[in-house]
Amino acid sequence: MKYSNRKTGVEWRALLWTARHPGMVVLPGALGTSTVLLGTSTTGMLTGGTLTALGSWYRAHPDSFDYFAAPVLRAWRRRWFSRYTGKWWRDTMLAVDLAPAHRKTGEHQVPRITKLRSAASSVDTVYVRMIPGQTAKLWESKTEELAVALNAERVGIEQVRPQIVALVVQRRESFTEVIEAPALSWDADAVDLDNVVIGEDEYGNDWRVPVIGQHIFGAGATGSGKGSLVWSLLRALAPLIRDGLVRLWVLDPKRMELVKTEGIAYRYAAEPEDCVDVVEEFVQDLERVQRVLAEQGKRKFSISRETPLNLLIVDEMGALLGFGEIAVTRAMRKAMSYIGTQGRATGHSMCGFVQEPSKDVVPVRDLFTVRICLRVTSAAHVDMTLGENARLRGALADEISNDVSTAGIGYVVQEKSRVPLRVRASYVDDSEIQELIEFVTSGRSSGLKVVA
Ligand SMILES: Nc1ncnc2c1ncn2[C@@H]1O[C@H](COP(=O)(O)OP(=O)(O)OP(=O)(O)O)[C@@H](O)[C@H]1O
């Protein structure tokens, strides 16, 4: 409650500011004390020594410097010398209408930055305390204005605590280089099916997807790079495919991208009727494993030659589920709904790709548990793929430019926070696809490994 029009005294505001930003006081304070106690030249030598040490570290070991020191220094610089600072921040908040005027005094209340993180040079995470009466939804509705005001490519919003929102500010394109294809691992034990690396995220970390007990859904317009999702996944799973611990069932109605899987797939089909036969056989296999588990008194499969992980890969699901012969679409819908609801416990997972993710085209969409949205042609496709309000929170997949230099870039929604994460799939070129095929087929024919 405000009873006075007078402002808090400047000395008290200075004290409060000091308490909130101890670093900004401790550093000059330490320099001042050192100058008084040790003299100018000693302080100068200490400062110079510290800067030289930092410079040497920067040049001698880029990996550790970029990992440990750069994020801290960058966050500090941006907090105090950028649009997040003082008057600039205030002007931004006023411009986007997030600094409401007080009802009685008319004074603008500016949301306060409590913390800034800058794990990657292209992305800042700015934690802001909202003004009472504001909601995360209100902030979400301002993401476009915030992006313009902060001169950013994109702003995403996440509510982290009751009064705190985090702004994910993408300052520029995080992915300026193609991500290398996953290395072929010889050892099947080295592959963690809960964390299969298929690319990188915008912070430069590995982008990992869970495969076991999950169904993966990838949406993207033509040329968005859906092929790289499949091939990255297959390269990461290569030793398990070779050893018969992962079996591929591939439906390739376009007969384009996945033709090369024919040599390593357990089943491959391209004609719609053949696709139905394969998916029905997949369902029979699922039921077989259900019986095996029942006999063994188990509720969940564990990966083995008898009960491998079966991966049904469906390229262009629309051709089989949405358009085409009614008998085909009906059979496909029925089988995929069954797999979607029953397959997780038996090791029968689906990986489906589509250009247009609407319910008419992919009625089984909601059964997929891991969703990836590459460049799409309509804003509505983003929420259809990633869930309600994903676009509002910052998954601007429809704004990725239609250019080959952005292929493989998209968004996923982080499980806990629900915040969209910008990712890029590794690119697997033709020679690396060939290398994968040879790795699997020669490993099988070497006689060392018997395929189930
Ligand atoms: N992850 C990636 N990184 C860099 N470039 C890529 C990546 N994925 C694809 N590309 C480039 O983009 C082009 C188109 O990719 P791709 O054919 O996989 O798209 P798509 O989504 O499968 O398209 P369609 O639905 O028409 O088959 C590729 O030929 C390649 O040059």
Image (spheres, rainbow, N blue to C red):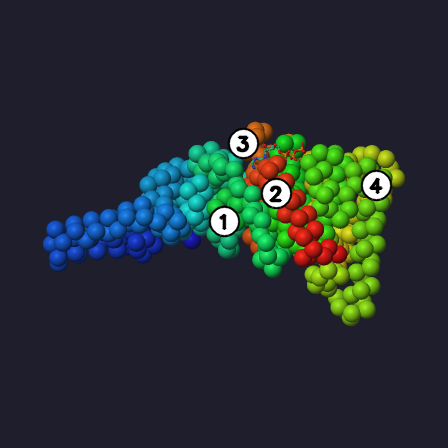
Q: Residue at x 22, y 54 (%)?
A: 29
Residue behind mark 1 = 205
As helix, strand or loop, the secondary structure at mark 4 comes to: helix
Which amino acid, by three-letter code, is at mark 2?
Glu
Q: Which mark is drawn over residue 107?
A: none
Q: Which is in the foreground here, disc 3 or disc 4?
A: 4
Q: Position of residue 26 (x, y in %)?
A: 26, 55
Which amino acid, by three-letter code, is at mark 3?
Ser
**Is mark 2 in CB contact (under 8 Å) with mark 4?**
no
Residue behind mark 4 = 274
Q: Position of residue 123 (x, y in %)?
A: 45, 43
Q: Callout 4: 10 Å neighbours few (<14), some, many (20+)?
A: some
Answer with the quadrant where ligand 1 appears in the image.
top right
Q: Looking at the picture, tell me which residue is in the foreground, 411 or 83.
A: 411
Q: Which mark is drawn over residue 405?
A: 3
Which amino acid, by three-letter code, is at mark 1?
Asn
Q: Which mark is drawn over residue 435?
A: 2
Quadrant where the image shows the C terminus: bottom right
Q: Earlier in the sequence, mark 4 or mark 1?
A: 1
As helix, strand or loop, the secondary structure at mark 3 comes to: helix
Alpha carbon separation for disc pair 3 and 4: 36 Å
Alpha carbon separation for disc pair 2 and 3: 24 Å
The reply, left or right, for residue 74 in relation to residue 270 is left
Which amino acid, by three-letter code, is at mark 4?
Asp
Alpha carbon separation for disc pair 1 and 2: 25 Å
Q: Earlier in the sequence, mark 3 or mark 1?
A: 1
Please indicate, yes or no, whether residue 156 appears anywhere in the rendered image: no
Q: Callout 1: 10 Å neighbours few (<14), some, many (20+)?
A: few
Query: Does mark 3's beta carbon lie closer than 8 Å to ligand 1?
Result: yes
Alpha carbon separation for disc pair 2 and 4: 28 Å
